Amino acid sequence: MAVAAGRDAELGSPGLLVLVVEDEFLVALNLERVLTRQGWRVLGPAATVAHALHLLEQGETPDAAVLEVNLRGEHVAGLRARQPGVRQRDHTAPET
């Protein structure tokens, strides 16, 4: 999973917009719930790159993004290219 924050976005700042791209339904819902409780506005969640791109075309630019790197075989590299002002940090969940 990749977490990306815009240069001026202070993580956890109230009212900022975060794009959530995650293809696992329960993970996406949990992310949305946690982020909303922390004061973020959530764009998505989107389960595919195509859906995420559609959301981005609607006009609002996210301040940050939480991106699943591999969406059922589809890589999010193209989506990252559409957000040039967003820095990226990759995180891998620990194996259980």
Image: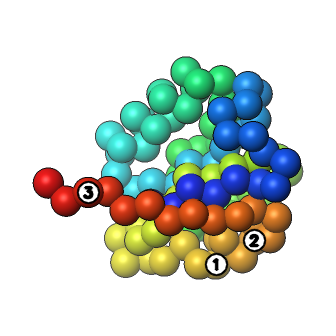
At a point 43% along the width and 43% down the height, the residue shown is: 28
Disc 1: CA contacts within 10 A as few (<14), some (14-19) or many (>=20): few
Whether pointer 3 and pointer 1 mark residues with C-beta atoms closer than 8 Å, the reply is no
Q: Distance between the residues labelled 2 and 3?
A: 29 Å
Label annotation for residue 25: none
Is 17 on the left-hand or right-hand side of 26? right
Label annotation for residue 78: 1
Please name whichever residue, 55 or 92, is drawn nearer the observer in this view of the structure: 92
Label 1 sits on a secondary structure element that is: helix
Label annotation for residue 94: 3
Question: Closer to the observer: label 2 or label 3?
Answer: 3
- Identify the image quadrant of the N terminus: bottom left
* Residue 66 image offset from top left, x and y in percent: 55, 53
The disc labelled 3 sits on which kind of residue? Answer: Pro
* Residue 9 image offset from top left, x and y in percent: 78, 45
Label annotation for residue 82: 2
Label 3 sits on a secondary structure element that is: loop
Disc 2: CA contacts within 10 A as few (<14), some (14-19) or many (>=20): few
Disc 3: CA contacts within 10 A as few (<14), some (14-19) or many (>=20): few
Q: Distance between the residues labelled 3 and 1?
A: 26 Å
Whether residue 51 appears in this view of the structure is no
- Identify the image quadrant of the C terminus: bottom left
Q: Examine the image and state in which quarter residue 30 appears.
A: top left
